[in-house]
Image (cartoon, helix red, strand yellow):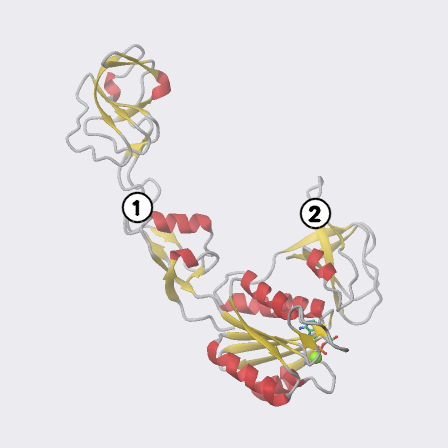
């Protein structure tokens, strides 16, 4: 999947985005030598048990030490984060001192550099901070902020248009007429898109009419980097998404049946460099299909070094029984790590492709290969959702 063109975006919007170039420090962090402790700035040579030094000044964090000097036999009272004043080369923490009138009495001898944080200890000017293809976490954003960066060059979030197709669908609480159901897929797919790091655009409900579907898809592609549709990709008489994506992909291969359960039917077309994912309408199928096909592709567009979900070999406590049907079964499971350090999983409920609640309860998808299933206590690979 082609990556989106990198651009610099505000730091505040960059969480979970991926850097497009190596980032280099232009300044030292910390910018100056400063104290790691509240205490007294001293000359190490003057320190020792019982040493008595004259307190000549007080220095708080954020204040300029210009003009302050720690001379022989002197000390400056200093707060964490304040610059090391001229003449001082060590800090004695306040807990190891006592004040007697204008003097401080030290309990200990300290070496040069004691509790001193040197300039550039975290980052030096010219140093590579993070390589390209770094997924930005809170800590990364903090480091970039410490360097004064306002914007960071990343692969931008994919703008993903999401639409539902189906004459039976109703949005929201309106009373249902005979044959109607409420649209859930748009909400799950918008949320999955956001969760994948994309900017999700609601393109609404679309009727099962070839021209309407075509104009919704073509119109959506105008303003989005990728489209996700649900419904209309099966073998029914009114499965118009399938026809439109076959047209747009200019190939019968744009429609396929994947040997997985749920989520067998899938339509896919690249329109220019924009992918269109025609996901099945059954609610659990559309979510599983998004997980398997759309999510990794969208994350690839956004530069993710590892676009796939993490997989773990888990213990199937109750096993998974199945009959051989030529398909990989993707079983919705609830998993938890146990005292043995292993992930233990169980079915999260009914596995019908229309049953969404078990999908909502699941925190993993178990990959149960074709065959007669997995015995209780057997191992099964699980994608962590
Ligand atoms: P389709 O893939 O269009 O043949 O739809 C398969 C099944 O999923 C049918 O029972 C549809 O009513 C149902 N379905 C399709 N789209 C949605 C949706 N957006 N929300 C909930 N159910 C849907
Ligand atoms: Mg339909």
Residue 374, compared with residue 263, is above or below; it is above
Left or right: where 358 falls relative to 49:
right
Q: Residue at x 27, y 16 (%)?
A: 47
Q: Position of residue 223 (x, y in %)?
A: 47, 77
Element type where label 2 sits in the image: strand
Give the camera-side residue of 297 and 196: 196
Q: Residue at x 33, y 45 (%)?
A: 123
Left or right: where 16 falls relative to 54:
right
User: Which numbered disc flags the more N-terminal residue, 1 or 2?
Assistant: 1
Give the camera-side residue of 286 and 273: 286
Write down the residue under mark 2: 336
Residues marked 1 and 2 touching at CB (< 8 Å): no
Q: Is residue 102 visible?
A: yes
Q: Position of residue 366 (x, y in %)?
A: 72, 59
Q: Residue at x 49, y 74 (%)?
A: 225
Left or right: where 81 falls relative to 202:
left
Give the image quadrant in which the ligand numbered 1 is located. Answer: bottom right
Q: Residue 124: which numbered mark, if any?
A: 1
Q: Quadrant of residue 340?
A: top right
Name the outermost residue toward the left. 67
Name the outermost residue toward the front. 175
Q: Residue 366: which numbered mark, if any?
A: none
Circle 1 Cα neighbour tier, 10 Å, few/some/many (<14 / 14–19 / ≥20): some
Q: Position of residue 11 (x, y in %)?
A: 39, 56
Q: Quadrant of residue 210?
A: bottom right
Q: Position of residue 228 (x, y in %)?
A: 58, 74
Q: Quadrant of residue 252?
A: bottom right
């Amino acid at each position: 999947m082609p990556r989106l063109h990198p651009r610099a975006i505000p730091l505040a919007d960059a969480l979970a985005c991926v850097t497009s170039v190596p980032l280099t420090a232009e300044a030292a962090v910390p910018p100056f030598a400063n104290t790691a402790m509240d205490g007294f700035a001293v000359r190490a040579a003057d320190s020792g048990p019982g040493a008595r030094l004259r307190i000549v000044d007080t220095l708080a964090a954020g204040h300029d030490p210009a003009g302050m000097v720690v001379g022989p036999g002197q000390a400056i009272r200093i707060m964490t984060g304040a610059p090391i004043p001229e003449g001082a080369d060590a800090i004695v923490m306040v807990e190891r001192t006592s004040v007697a009138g204008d003097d401080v009495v030290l309990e200990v001898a300290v070496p040069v550099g004691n509790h001193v944080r040197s300039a550039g200890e975290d980052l030096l000017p010219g140093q590579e901070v993070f390589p390209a293809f770094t997924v930005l976490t809170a800590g990364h954003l903090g480091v970039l902020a410490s360097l004064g960066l306002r914007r960071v060059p990343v692969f931008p979030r994919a703008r993903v248009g999401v639409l539902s197709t189906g004459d039976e669908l109703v949005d929201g609480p309106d009373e249902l007429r005979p044959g109607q159901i409420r649209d859930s897929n748009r909400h799950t797919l918008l949320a999955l898109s956001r969760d994948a790091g994309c900017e999700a655009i609601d393109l609404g409900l679309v009727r099962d009419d070839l021209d309407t579907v075509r104009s919704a898809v073509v119109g959506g592609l105008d303003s989005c980097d990728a489209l996700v549709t649900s419904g209309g990709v099966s073998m029914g008489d009114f499965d118009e998404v399938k026809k439109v994506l076959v047209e747009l992909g200019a190939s019968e291969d744009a429609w396929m049946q994947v040997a997985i359960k749920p989520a067998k039917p899938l339509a896919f077309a690249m329109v220019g460099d924009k992918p269109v994912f025609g996901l099945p309408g059954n609610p659990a199928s559309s979510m599983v299909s998004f997980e398997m096909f759309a999510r990794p592709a969208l994350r690839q567009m956004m530069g993710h070094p590892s676009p796939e979900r993490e997989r773990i070999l888990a213990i199937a406590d109750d096993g998974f029984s199945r009959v051989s049907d030529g398909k990989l079964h993707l079983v919705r499971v609830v998993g938890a790590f146990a005292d043995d350090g292993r992930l233990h999983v169980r079915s999260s409920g009914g596995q019908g492709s229309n049953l969404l609640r078990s999908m909502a309860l699941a925190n993993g998808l178990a990959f149960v290969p074709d065959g007669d299933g997995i015995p209780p206590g057997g191992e099964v690979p699980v994608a962590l959702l």
